[in-house]
Protein backbone atom coordinates (compact mmCIF):
# COMPACT_ATOMS: atom_id res chain seq x y z
CA UNK A 1 0.00 0.00 0.00
CA UNK A 2 2.77 2.43 0.95
CA UNK A 3 4.54 1.59 -2.30
CA UNK A 4 1.44 2.42 -4.33
CA UNK A 5 1.03 5.75 -2.51
CA UNK A 6 4.67 6.60 -3.11
CA UNK A 7 4.38 5.83 -6.82
CA UNK A 8 1.21 7.93 -7.06
CA UNK A 9 2.80 10.89 -5.31
CA UNK A 10 5.88 10.59 -7.49
CA UNK A 11 3.69 10.53 -10.63
CA UNK A 12 1.83 13.66 -9.49
CA UNK A 13 5.18 15.38 -8.82
CA UNK A 14 6.46 14.54 -12.31
CA UNK A 15 3.21 15.77 -13.85
CA UNK A 16 3.40 18.96 -11.81
CA UNK A 17 6.95 19.68 -12.99
CA UNK A 18 5.96 19.00 -16.60
CA UNK A 19 3.05 21.44 -16.35
CA UNK A 20 5.28 24.13 -14.84
CA UNK A 21 7.77 23.68 -17.66
CA UNK A 22 4.99 23.78 -20.25
CA UNK A 23 3.45 27.02 -18.97
CA UNK A 24 6.88 28.60 -18.54
CA UNK A 25 7.66 27.76 -22.17
CA UNK A 26 4.32 29.14 -23.28
CA UNK A 27 4.99 32.39 -21.40
CA UNK A 28 8.46 32.72 -22.88
CA UNK A 29 7.14 32.04 -26.39
CA UNK A 30 4.39 34.59 -25.87
CA UNK A 31 7.00 37.24 -25.03
CA UNK A 32 9.21 36.69 -28.08
CA UNK A 33 10.33 40.13 -29.24
CA UNK A 34 10.28 40.69 -32.98
CA UNK A 35 11.48 44.28 -33.62
CA UNK A 36 12.67 47.31 -31.72
CA UNK A 37 12.00 51.05 -31.85
CA UNK A 38 14.62 52.88 -29.79
CA UNK A 39 14.01 56.53 -28.90
CA UNK A 40 15.71 59.19 -26.77
CA UNK A 41 19.17 58.75 -28.30
CA UNK A 42 20.73 62.22 -28.15
CA UNK A 43 24.28 61.71 -26.91
CA UNK A 44 24.96 58.64 -29.04
CA UNK A 45 23.47 57.32 -32.30
CA UNK A 46 20.83 54.62 -31.95
CA UNK A 47 23.23 52.13 -33.52
CA UNK A 48 25.75 52.60 -30.68
CA UNK A 49 23.15 51.79 -28.04
CA UNK A 50 22.10 48.69 -29.99
CA UNK A 51 25.73 47.55 -30.26
CA UNK A 52 26.00 47.87 -26.47
CA UNK A 53 22.95 45.58 -26.15
CA UNK A 54 24.43 43.11 -28.68
CA UNK A 55 21.52 43.69 -31.05
CA UNK A 56 22.62 43.77 -34.70
CA UNK A 57 19.42 42.25 -36.13
CA UNK A 58 15.84 41.72 -34.98
CA UNK A 59 16.59 38.04 -34.41
CA UNK A 60 18.94 39.03 -31.57
CA UNK A 61 15.89 40.20 -29.60
CA UNK A 62 15.02 36.54 -28.95
CA UNK A 63 17.76 36.54 -26.35
CA UNK A 64 15.76 39.02 -24.25
CA UNK A 65 12.57 39.29 -22.30
CA UNK A 66 11.07 42.74 -21.73
CA UNK A 67 12.57 42.97 -18.25
CA UNK A 68 16.04 41.74 -19.24
CA UNK A 69 16.09 44.14 -22.21
CA UNK A 70 15.32 47.08 -19.92
CA UNK A 71 18.01 45.95 -17.45
CA UNK A 72 20.54 45.80 -20.26
CA UNK A 73 19.92 49.40 -21.33
CA UNK A 74 19.99 50.58 -17.73
CA UNK A 75 23.58 49.30 -17.52
CA UNK A 76 24.71 51.74 -20.22
CA UNK A 77 26.79 54.50 -18.57
CA UNK A 78 24.83 57.26 -20.33
CA UNK A 79 21.35 55.95 -19.44
CA UNK A 80 19.45 57.20 -16.39
CA UNK A 81 16.18 55.36 -17.01
CA UNK A 82 14.45 53.25 -19.67
CA UNK A 83 10.80 52.55 -20.45
CA UNK A 84 10.06 49.33 -22.35
CA UNK A 85 6.65 48.54 -23.90
CA UNK A 86 5.59 45.79 -26.32
CA UNK A 87 2.59 46.09 -28.64
CA UNK A 88 0.32 43.34 -30.02
CA UNK A 89 2.70 42.71 -32.92
CA UNK A 90 5.59 41.99 -30.53
CA UNK A 91 7.26 45.26 -31.52
CA UNK A 92 9.17 46.77 -28.61
CA UNK A 93 9.33 50.50 -28.01
CA UNK A 94 12.16 51.62 -25.75
CA UNK A 95 12.35 55.22 -24.53
CA UNK A 96 15.68 55.89 -22.83
CA UNK A 97 16.36 58.90 -20.64
CA UNK A 98 19.99 59.94 -20.76
CA UNK A 99 21.80 61.34 -17.75
CA UNK A 100 22.03 65.10 -17.35
CA UNK A 101 25.62 66.21 -17.82
CA UNK A 102 26.87 69.53 -16.48
CA UNK A 103 30.51 69.60 -17.57
CA UNK A 104 33.40 67.83 -19.24
CA UNK A 105 36.34 66.89 -17.03
CA UNK A 106 39.98 66.22 -17.84
CA UNK A 107 41.31 63.79 -15.26
CA UNK A 108 44.54 61.81 -15.50
CA UNK A 109 44.75 62.60 -19.23
CA UNK A 110 41.28 61.14 -19.88
CA UNK A 111 38.05 62.89 -20.82
CA UNK A 112 34.89 62.42 -18.76
CA UNK A 113 31.33 63.68 -18.84
CA UNK A 114 30.28 64.87 -15.38
CA UNK A 115 26.69 64.40 -14.26
CA UNK A 116 24.59 66.74 -12.15
CA UNK A 117 25.48 64.42 -9.23
CA UNK A 118 29.21 64.99 -9.96
CA UNK A 119 29.68 61.43 -11.24
CA UNK A 120 32.55 61.00 -13.72
CA UNK A 121 31.47 59.00 -16.80
CA UNK A 122 34.16 58.12 -19.39
CA UNK A 123 33.36 59.61 -22.79
CA UNK A 124 32.42 56.93 -25.33
CA UNK A 125 33.59 57.22 -28.97
CA UNK A 126 31.03 58.82 -31.32
CA UNK A 127 29.47 60.84 -28.49
CA UNK A 128 27.80 64.00 -29.77
CA UNK A 129 29.82 67.13 -29.00
CA UNK A 130 28.22 69.02 -26.12
CA UNK A 131 28.53 72.72 -25.37
CA UNK A 132 29.65 72.26 -21.77
CA UNK A 133 32.34 73.95 -19.67
CA UNK A 134 35.58 71.99 -19.40
CA UNK A 135 37.09 71.43 -15.97
CA UNK A 136 40.88 71.30 -16.11
CA UNK A 137 43.75 70.88 -13.62
CA UNK A 138 41.80 68.87 -11.09
CA UNK A 139 43.85 67.45 -8.25
CA UNK A 140 44.52 63.81 -9.11
CA UNK A 141 45.24 62.60 -5.59
CA UNK A 142 42.81 60.09 -4.14
CA UNK A 143 40.25 57.81 -5.74
CA UNK A 144 37.79 58.90 -8.40
CA UNK A 145 35.00 59.00 -5.81
CA UNK A 146 37.09 61.24 -3.56
CA UNK A 147 37.72 63.62 -6.45
CA UNK A 148 33.99 63.70 -7.25
CA UNK A 149 33.30 64.80 -3.67
CA UNK A 150 36.23 67.20 -3.37
CA UNK A 151 36.07 70.93 -2.62
CA UNK A 152 37.34 71.58 -6.14
CA UNK A 153 34.28 69.92 -7.64
CA UNK A 154 32.02 71.77 -5.22
CA UNK A 155 33.60 75.06 -6.34
CA UNK A 156 33.27 74.18 -10.03
CA UNK A 157 29.57 73.39 -9.64
CA UNK A 158 29.01 76.58 -7.65
CA UNK A 159 30.34 78.50 -10.66
CA UNK A 160 28.32 76.52 -13.20
CA UNK A 161 25.03 76.69 -11.30
CA UNK A 162 25.43 80.31 -10.26
CA UNK A 163 25.87 81.29 -13.90
CA UNK A 164 22.81 79.26 -14.90
CA UNK A 165 20.69 80.78 -12.15
CA UNK A 166 21.35 84.25 -13.55
CA UNK A 167 19.39 83.25 -16.63
CA UNK A 168 21.55 85.21 -19.08
CA UNK A 169 24.27 84.29 -21.56
CA UNK A 170 27.11 83.87 -19.08
CA UNK A 171 26.56 80.13 -18.59
CA UNK A 172 26.91 79.61 -22.37
CA UNK A 173 30.05 81.78 -22.46
CA UNK A 174 32.02 79.75 -19.90
CA UNK A 175 34.34 77.48 -21.86
CA UNK A 176 36.90 76.44 -19.21
CA UNK A 177 37.15 76.34 -15.43
CA UNK A 178 40.79 75.88 -14.52
CA UNK A 179 40.84 74.60 -10.94
CA UNK A 180 44.65 74.80 -10.74
CA UNK A 181 44.86 71.76 -8.46
CA UNK A 182 43.31 73.62 -5.55
CA UNK A 183 44.77 77.06 -6.32
CA UNK A 184 43.02 80.26 -7.38
CA UNK A 185 40.42 79.38 -10.01
CA UNK A 186 40.74 80.79 -13.53
CA UNK A 187 37.75 81.20 -15.81
CA UNK A 188 37.92 81.39 -19.62
CA UNK A 189 35.05 82.71 -21.72
CA UNK A 190 34.27 81.71 -25.29
CA UNK A 191 35.82 84.01 -27.91
CA UNK A 192 37.45 86.12 -25.18
CA UNK A 193 41.16 86.82 -24.86
CA UNK A 194 40.99 87.63 -21.17
CA UNK A 195 41.28 85.21 -18.27
CA UNK A 196 39.08 85.82 -15.24
CA UNK A 197 40.72 85.26 -11.85
CA UNK A 198 38.09 84.17 -9.33
CA UNK A 199 40.12 82.88 -6.41
CA UNK A 200 38.34 80.29 -4.20
CA UNK A 201 36.02 82.29 -1.95
CA UNK A 202 32.54 83.79 -2.48
CA UNK A 203 32.31 82.27 -5.95
CA UNK A 204 28.56 82.77 -6.39
CA UNK A 205 28.95 86.47 -5.58
CA UNK A 206 31.85 86.81 -8.01
CA UNK A 207 29.88 85.20 -10.83
CA UNK A 208 27.10 87.71 -10.17
CA UNK A 209 29.67 90.52 -10.30
CA UNK A 210 31.17 89.22 -13.54
CA UNK A 211 27.74 88.97 -15.14
CA UNK A 212 26.87 92.52 -14.10
CA UNK A 213 30.24 93.75 -15.36
CA UNK A 214 29.78 92.18 -18.77
CA UNK A 215 26.26 93.58 -19.05
CA UNK A 216 27.12 97.10 -17.96
CA UNK A 217 30.38 97.85 -19.73
CA UNK A 218 31.10 94.84 -21.88
CA UNK A 219 29.51 96.47 -24.90
CA UNK A 220 31.03 99.90 -24.28
CA UNK A 221 34.68 98.94 -24.04
CA UNK A 222 36.55 95.95 -25.36
CA UNK A 223 36.63 94.19 -22.01
CA UNK A 224 37.33 90.81 -23.56
CA UNK A 225 40.53 92.16 -25.14
CA UNK A 226 42.10 92.65 -21.72
CA UNK A 227 44.67 90.08 -20.67
CA UNK A 228 42.95 89.40 -17.38
CA UNK A 229 40.08 90.44 -15.13
CA UNK A 230 40.85 89.96 -11.45
CA UNK A 231 37.90 89.44 -9.09
CA UNK A 232 39.86 87.99 -6.19
CA UNK A 233 39.65 91.05 -3.98
CA UNK A 234 36.52 92.29 -2.21
CA UNK A 235 34.96 95.44 -3.64
CA UNK A 236 37.69 95.73 -6.29
CA UNK A 237 38.01 94.70 -9.94
CA UNK A 238 41.37 94.86 -11.66
CA UNK A 239 41.91 94.68 -15.42
CA UNK A 240 45.39 94.42 -16.86
CA UNK A 241 48.20 92.28 -18.27
CA UNK A 242 48.94 88.70 -17.28
CA UNK A 243 52.42 89.53 -16.08
CA UNK A 244 51.20 91.83 -13.32
CA UNK A 245 48.72 89.20 -12.08
CA UNK A 246 51.32 86.45 -11.87
CA UNK A 247 49.31 84.02 -14.01
Image: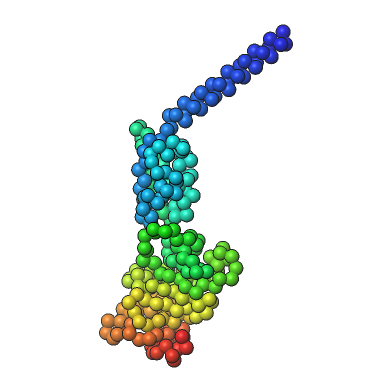
Quadrant for residue 237, please give it. Answer: bottom left
In percent of width and height, residue 163 lies at 39, 71
Residue at screen point 37% across, 63% down:
130
In the depicted structure, whether residue 210 falls above or below residue 92? below
Horizontal side of residue 4 vs 116, given as left or right:
right
Quadrant for residue 166, please give it. Answer: bottom left
Q: Residue furthest right?
A: 2
Q: Residue furthest top?
A: 1
From this viewpoint, is residue 45 visible?
Answer: yes
Residue at screen point 31% across, 78% down:
215
In the depicted structure, whether residue 210 falls above or below residue 102? below
In percent of width and height, residue 191 lies at 32, 77
From this viewpoint, is residue 83 visible?
Answer: no
In the depicted structure, whether residue 79 falls above or below residue 116? above
Residue at screen point 42% across, 39% down:
60
In percent of width and height, residue 225 lies at 32, 85
Amino acid sequence: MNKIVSITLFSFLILFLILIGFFSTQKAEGEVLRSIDLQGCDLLPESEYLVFANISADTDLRNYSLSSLREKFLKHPYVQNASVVMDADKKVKIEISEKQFEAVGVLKEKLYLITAQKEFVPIIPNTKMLDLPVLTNLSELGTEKEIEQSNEMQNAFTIIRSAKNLGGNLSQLISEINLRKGGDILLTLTRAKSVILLGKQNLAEKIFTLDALLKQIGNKISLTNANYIDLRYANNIFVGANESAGI
